[in-house]
Amino acid sequence: MSASAVGYAKENAGRFLEELKTLLRIPSVSTTPEHKGDVEKAAQWVASELKRIGMEHVEVIGDGPLSKTGGHPLAYADWLHAAGKPTVLCYAHHDVQPPDPLDEWVSPPFEPTERNGNLYARGAVDDKGQLVTQLKAIESLMKKDGKLPINVRVIYEGEEEVGGERIAAFVREHPERLKADFALISDTEMFAPELPTLTVGLRGMIYTELEVRGAKSDLHSGMYGGVAPNPFVALAQIIAGLKDREGKILIPGFYDDVAKPSADELKAWKALPFDEKEYREKEVGALALVGEKGYSTLERTWARPTLDVHGIVGGFIGAGAKTVIPAKATAKVSMRLVPEMTPEKAFRQYREYVDKIKPEGVTVEVRLIHQGEALVIGTDNPYVKAATKALKKVWGKETVFIRSGGSIPIVGDFEKFLKIPSVMMGFGLPDDGLHAPNEKFHIANFHRGIESLIEFFDEAAS
Amino acid sequence: MSASAVGYAKENAGRFLEELKTLLRIPSVSTTPEHKGDVEKAAQWVASELKRIGMEHVEVIGDGPLSKTGGHPLAYADWLHAAGKPTVLCYAHHDVQPPDPLDEWVSPPFEPTERNGNLYARGAVDDKGQLVTQLKAIESLMKKDGKLPINVRVIYEGEEEVGGERIAAFVREHPERLKADFALISDTEMFAPELPTLTVGLRGMIYTELEVRGAKSDLHSGMYGGVAPNPFVALAQIIAGLKDREGKILIPGFYDDVAKPSADELKAWKALPFDEKEYREKEVGALALVGEKGYSTLERTWARPTLDVHGIVGGFIGAGAKTVIPAKATAKVSMRLVPEMTPEKAFRQYREYVDKIKPEGVTVEVRLIHQGEALVIGTDNPYVKAATKALKKVWGKETVFIRSGGSIPIVGDFEKFLKIPSVMMGFGLPDDGLHAPNEKFHIANFHRGIESLIEFFDEAAS
C-alpha cells in the first residue's frame, strides 16, 4: 500500500514543490502585529488544502473564546475511519519568524527561490516545508488508496514563534478533540545530511524582558554624565552578572534541578559524526565556540541550560552621535532550560537575582514573555520504533537519536494533557539557517520527507 | 550709546521673538543625513539676517575643498570699522540634535510654541535662541547708532552636534580670517534663574562606537545557545568592565592626567545655591544620583571624567520575541574628559583596554566618531571682567563662575589656533532640557540676553 503512495508522491513531486511555494509566499510572521492577516491567510490556505486532500471536519479555530487571547488561528482536521488502528496527531506550524535583517537575503524572503538544490524562503524549513510534507504524505495515501492506513488528526498552529499560547489553551481545554495514541511533530532537523534522525529531547525556555529606568527623561550626557544613572550601563552590569565569561549562569540555584543525560546517551552522542572544527568554521562561523568548560559542544547545546540576549531597545541607534543618557532601556533576555528544570522556578530565581544585583539609582522590571518545558522521550516506545523502520526503508540507514537545543513547547503539553508521546521526525539540515537570513529547505529532503511519512503511517498501522 | 540700543531691543522684543521662531521652524538636525538640506537652509537664513542688519562680507562657506568633508556649511560675516577698538569673534551654532523620542513632546519640536513664559522647540536654547541673541544685539546697536562699539566677526557653524569637523578645519587652515582679540561663545547656561553666570571650564570628550562580531550570521538561540558567542553579552561584559558600580572608570591610566580644581574654585562651587535633593528629584528625576564616591555632584559633572552608553545597535528590538543570537552589535559609548587629559591618549587607553578585556570568540572594532579637548579659562582676563560688568548692569548681581560638564570643542580650537580666550556667556537655564524632548528657552532670558550682549560689546570697547 505504501509503495503505490510513494509512487504517487514521486510522480507529483514538481506540483508538491510548487504548492509549498504558494504557502511560502504568504508572509505569516506571527511576532509582529502587522502580519496578523497573513497568519490568518496561511491558516486558511492550510485548511483548504486539508479539505482538498480528503480530510474531514476541517476547521479554522480562531473565533469564540479563543480569539480573546489576541493570538493567531489554529487549523484542525481529522480522518478517523481506520477501525482498530491507532490514531496519530499531526502537528506543525504555519507561522514564521520575522525576516530581518532584510538586506542580508540573497533573494527576497517571501519569494521562494530555487538555488543549488535548495528552496530559499523564510519558513522554508521552519516550518512550512515540513508542514507540507505531512499534507503531501496524506494526499499521496488518500489519492492512491482512497483511505489512510491509520486514523489521523491534524492540528496546525500559527503562533509557534511567539510562544503558542492559543494551542496550549486548546490542548488544555479540549483534550477530547485531540485524542490520539501518539503525536507526530514535523519541526526538527537531521543530525547530518543522509542521516535519518529522531529527536528525543528538547530544551525548554523562558523569554523575558528586563526594563531598566534611570532618570525621568532623556538627559544630556555632558550636563549629567557623572550623576544620572545610565540604563544601558545598568543593563550591562546586570547582564554581565547573569553569566560569567565561561558561560556559567550565575543565578543562585539555577543548576540545582539539571538532569544529567544517561551514560548510554552520552556514549551515543560521542559516536555521532561531528567535526567540531567544521561546525565552528562553516556552521557557526565564529573565532571560537564559547560556553561552559567541561562539557562537549553537543552537551552544551542539548543538555545544559544557557542564557542569551537578543537585543536592547531604547537609546540612540541612528547614524553618527547623540550625546544622550536615555531614560530607559529594555533587554530581551532568554534562557534555555533542560530536564528537570521548570520554567516557573527558573523565572523566579532569575527575577529575584536581578533584583539583588541591580545597581543603585535604577528601577528594574522583569517581564516573562513566554515559557516552555524541557523534556525527553523514551526510545523504547512502539511509535518511535515504527519511525525508525520507516526511515530505514527510505534512507537505507539506522536512525540516530539526538536532542535539540530548541524548544517545542507543544510536545510538553501533549505529554501533560493528552498523555501521549511525540515522535519528532524532521528533515531540516544543520545549515538550513532557521530564524536567519537565507533560510532554506534541501529540496531532496522535502521529497524524501514525504516518502518517510508515508512509510511511517504504514508502519504505525501494523 | 548702549542705553539707546537697549531701548531699541525692548521696543522690538516681539519682532525679535517671532524672528527666532522662523529659525526654529527649520529642522536643521545635523546628526542624520536626511536633514542636510535643512542645515543649509538654516545657514542661509542666518546669512541673510547678517546682511540685513548691516554686517559685511557675509558668506556661507560650504563650497570648495571644505565640502569634501561632507559636512554642513558655516556662516561668516564681519564689521571692522571701530578703529583702535578690540575685535570680538562671535560664535554660535544653527544645527540641532534629533528630536526623538517624538512622542514625548507636548508640542511639535519644530513648531515653536509659547507656554508659561517659555518658548518650546528643538534648538530653542541649544543653540538657535542664543545665536539670535547675538544677531539682535548687533542689530540693536547698528540700527540705533549706525555703527558698532567694537569690531565684530561672526562665525556660525552647522555641525556642533556632530563634532564640528568643518569649523575646526577652517580655524586651523584660515586663522587670519578669524583674527580677533577674544571670542564670545553663546552656547552655555546660567547656574540658576536670575544668577548671571560665566562658564570658565568645559569637559572634553571622545565619542566612540564599539562593534562586536560573533558568528558569521544571525543564529537560532535554541540550536546555538551554549556555543555561539553572543555580541550583546560580550558588549555587556566589556561595558561592565569599563566602569565599576561606583562610577569609577577602570581603564588603566585613565585618571593619570586629571587636574584637580583649585582650592578657591572648589570653595566657590560650595557657595553656589545648589539643592541636591531638588536637583535629584526635579531635574534628574532618579532614585539616586550615581557616580564616584568622595566627589560632590558639581565636581563629578564639571571636573571628573565620566563614561556613558547612548544606545546599542543590532539584534531584535521589535515587539514580542525573536530567539536570535545576533551576528553583531554596536554600542555607542562616550567619555567626558577634564583638563589635562587629552582625547588622543584617552582613546588609545580605552581601545587597548577593550582589546584586553574582550571575551573569547568575538572580534571588537573600536571607532572614534569625534573628540574635543577639555579646558579652563582664566577669570583674570579683561574680557571676562568686561562681561561681569555688563551682566551686573542688566541683572543687578555679581557674576558666578562655573564650569560645564558639556563640551564645546571650538573653544579649544580658538585657544590653540587663534591664541584667543573665550568668554562663555549664555542664558540657558538648568531645566531647559537640552537634547531632550520639550527643550525650551525662557523668553525673559532671551530678551535679557540680548541686552547683556549689547552692554558687553560696549564694555569691551572701553
Image (tube, coloured by chain):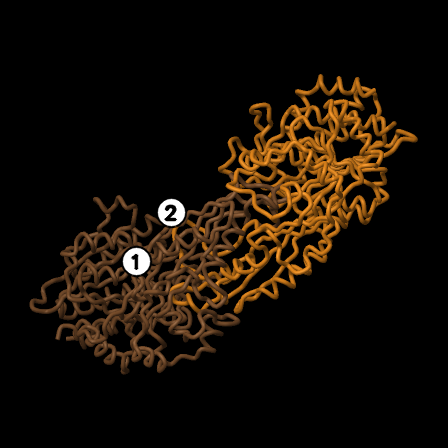
Chain colours: A orange, B brown
Return the disc, 2 or 1, that comes first in the chain's sequence.
2
Q: Residue at x 74, y 49 (%)?
A: A259
Element type where label 2 sits in the image: helix
Q: Nearer the viewer, residue A211 or B60?
A: A211
Q: Nearer the viewer, residue B211 or B392?
A: B211
Q: From mark 2 to mark 1, how far is it between C-alphas?
A: 16 Å
Q: Nearer the viewer, residue B270 or B188?
A: B270
Q: Quadrant of the N terminus of chain A?
A: top right
Residue type pointed to by label 2: Glu
Instruction: Please determine whether, in this image, residue A60 is positioned above or below residue A150.
Output: below
- Residue that numbered label 1 is attached to: B94
Question: Which of the 4 image quarters holds residue A391?
Answer: top right
Could one spot residue B7 in this view of the protein? no
On the same chain, marks 2 and 1? The answer is yes
Say whether residue A131 is left or right of residue A218. right
- Residue that numbered label 2 is attached to: B34
Q: Nearer the viewer, residue A23 or B117?
A: A23
Q: Residues within 10 Å of mark 1 (few under 14, many from 20)?
A: many
Instruction: Please determine whether, in this image, residue B366 is positioned above or below residue A284.
Output: below
Question: x and y percent of residue B278 in the render?
Answer: 46, 77
Question: x and y percent of residue A36 in the render?
Answer: 64, 43
Name of the residue lying farthest toward the right: A84
Q: Residue at x 56, y 33 (%)?
A: A278
Instruction: Please determine whether, in this image, residue A138 is positioned above or below residue A101.
Output: above
Q: Residues within 10 Å of mark 2 (few under 14, many from 20)?
A: few
Could one spot residue A68 in this view of the protein? yes
Question: x and y percent of residue A162 in the render?
Answer: 66, 46
